[in-house]
Image (cartoon, rainbow, N blue to C red):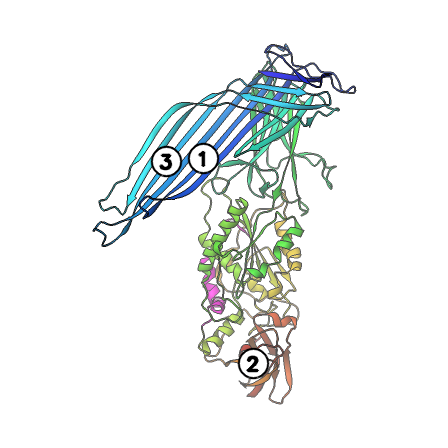
Amino acid sequence: MLFVVVWGLLSSGLMTVAQVPKGGRLASSKAPAAAPKCAGAWTGSITYARTQSLSNDKTVPRVSGRGEDKTSFRMQYEYKANVRVVEDPAKNGRSDGKATVSMTSTATEISTATEKNSCDRGKTWRDMKGDFKSTTKTVGNGKPEANASVGVNNDGTYSVSVGIPQVQGETSGETSSSFSGQCTKKEGKTLTVPATPTTVDGNSLTSDGTHRINPSDPNRISGTYSRTWQNVTETITWNLEKCGAPLRITDLKFEDMKWPTWNDWKEVVEQKGTIDGNFVKVTAKVLNASGESKSAEVAFKETYKGDKWDGARPDQPIKNHLDFINVTVEPGEEKDVEMLWDTSGYAWYDDGRPRLVQRVKAELWEKSKLVDDETKNIKIAPKPLVLVHGLWSNWKAWETWQNILTTSHSYDWKAFPVGEKPDKGLMNTGGAFLSTQPTASIAENARQLESYVKYAQEDRNAWHVDLVAHSMGGLISRYYISQIMEMPSEGDFRPKVSRLLMLGTPNMGSPCADVMNLAFEALGENVEAIRQLRQDYLEGFNRVNIARKGVKFSVLAGNPLPTMCKSVVWNDGVVPVPSAKWKIKDNAESKSLHTDLTGTSDFSAFVKPRLAIGPRGDHNPEPPDPSQYTGRLGSVREYGAAFALVGQPMSYDDKPFAKALEVAPKQAVEVEIPVNAAANLGVTFMTDPGVTVSLIDNNGNIVARNLAKSPESTGWFRSLFYDKPVAAGTWKIRIENTGDMPHRIVLTTWAGVSR
């Protein structure tokens, strides 16, 4: 039953209330002069919600002084009533309020009693414990008539009241106990209290009267009022109209699922929004405030009205959804019309610009005529970006990326570099540069990546993430996808990783790892991180880690250098271009060195364009090339007139020349190297960027040099290549430490590279 309260200011300064009894017509105070007159009743919807929580933890010493009692109490109460305010079917000016009520209350008390006692007259003592748990749950629901009122003041302010009577419910519970440490074993018990009928108290609330009627639209009011006292929060939300269309939309809401439970729907909080790729349930409430059955159609659309850049664009249906959904609403009924929306791509426009808010409009059509519409904004943030570091590195390799993501979209685009929170996952890829400490295997590191992906999903409530991996991080990511990542058993069946972007990943290994691994072995050292980058190791890796499981792969290869260990091939100082590209169709090249591939320029040119894909872009992975399963490279790849990669497997002497030494600060040393007659000569070494290394022939001439602090000095593997025939003899390597700290260098030689 609906009441309208009209407030009039009397000369005495007091307020009087005129209440319209059931069956009477509802009226408000006279609207401003410019307002149109309307003698109809308020109709629409009012929602009331009440939440309450209690908690209490206490510890009390036992009387004996040898123990304590711990008690933990938790109570949670949730009550919601949707009140439909409808016109009486007789159309005589009367209105009725009908509520749909749901309520759940749970109370749990857990207590533990602990006391030290002896079973052998004080010779030995033990803790004797008793654990007790009591749970009570009350649920209630019903569809009673409800009271509502609107009070309007002469100054245009108004208040809204709602009152919901009692409904029926039932209470159930369970108690359990367990014991340990007693001299005589004591069995615990579990008792279940069957459901018992009960009564759920009604609730009521009145807004504070500060809301104001819009003079240009005095026949429509909507708003929200909330109050919190002690540990109770009450909220009413209303959408009411006089002389409005009998059939209209009273509410539009969004829900997404709480990861990882499919169909666990929770209303989307406007300030927080949802994540790109999540499914969102869009619900329009359609109210029939008339006394006759009505049929209509609901259309859900993207609307750009009010958008700064695209305000002139026409509305269009949500991608992959029907133009209209049919609905029949009985007299006085309020019915939900739902659409399941795949939000993939909706964090971006189709031209790659960030879409900071999506405007969704629900239109209500009756007999081919638009009778009502409702528009609501929802924020959709990009998928969380899990960042996977490579060899001799840690999460700080990505330290600047949160700022990059923020400036590229918003602060809602979150970076999750693996290892930033060690308790969520920590990879060991060799510690500091040139470290010989034990490292975790690719498989072990992939398990840490698995943990971090779960952390990112939980933190952002994201059903899907993207991966960006540098160097060996790409191999770890591939292993995780192929061997560990589980495919969904229900729902949309899409993989939790939408896209893997690899930056300088040695998908087919590195010839420098082959060379330096032999050098370390000749020196009696086992550097596992280098061993895992050998070409033969990756050949076996590629035979096993084949499955992509629907993940879209992309690779970026660095190409600033023309030669590397025993190879004449464009490379980034660590990885040859063909090794990085492997057989992955979506690939690109960069002039960046290996350690610079995580910089801003490559993010802008390669990473962002592959992640900032709008809803109508290509989100589907390409099928893998079957030839990827053969392991090594097959044919010669041309890189201009002068250079080509030799396709044959590399061969090395059984006992290569290798040397390791430490060079003091500001010092220079020379190392003699034996040289056999060959078509050319190369030296590969690993050291700090502050070290200059020169190759000196048997006549004392410097024939090649790699300078300290040069771009080439930042690579893990640094090479000198003399591309002319050499005679047998003794050459020298000159090593100059330009820094203020001692630095270790490990070097080896190779020769005979053919074209």
Residue 714, quarter of picture? bottom right
Residue 264's x, y, as percent? 49, 37
Q: Which residue is mark 3?
A: 134
Nearer-the-camera pick, 297 or 268: 268
Q: Earlier in the sequence, mark 1 or mark 3?
A: 1
Q: Are the residues flagged by discs 2 and 3 in contact, CB closer than 8 Å?
A: no
Residue 499's x, y, as percent? 56, 51
Judged left or right of residue 485, residue 132 is: left
Residue 240's x, y, as percent? 64, 22
The amino acid type, in three-letter code, at marker 1 is Met
Q: Is residue 207 above or below residue 570?
A: above
Judged left or right of residue 605, residue 144 is: left
Q: Which residue is mark 1?
A: 75
Residue 534: say if magenta.
yes
Residue 627: say if magenta.
no
Q: Which residues are magenta?
A: 526-552
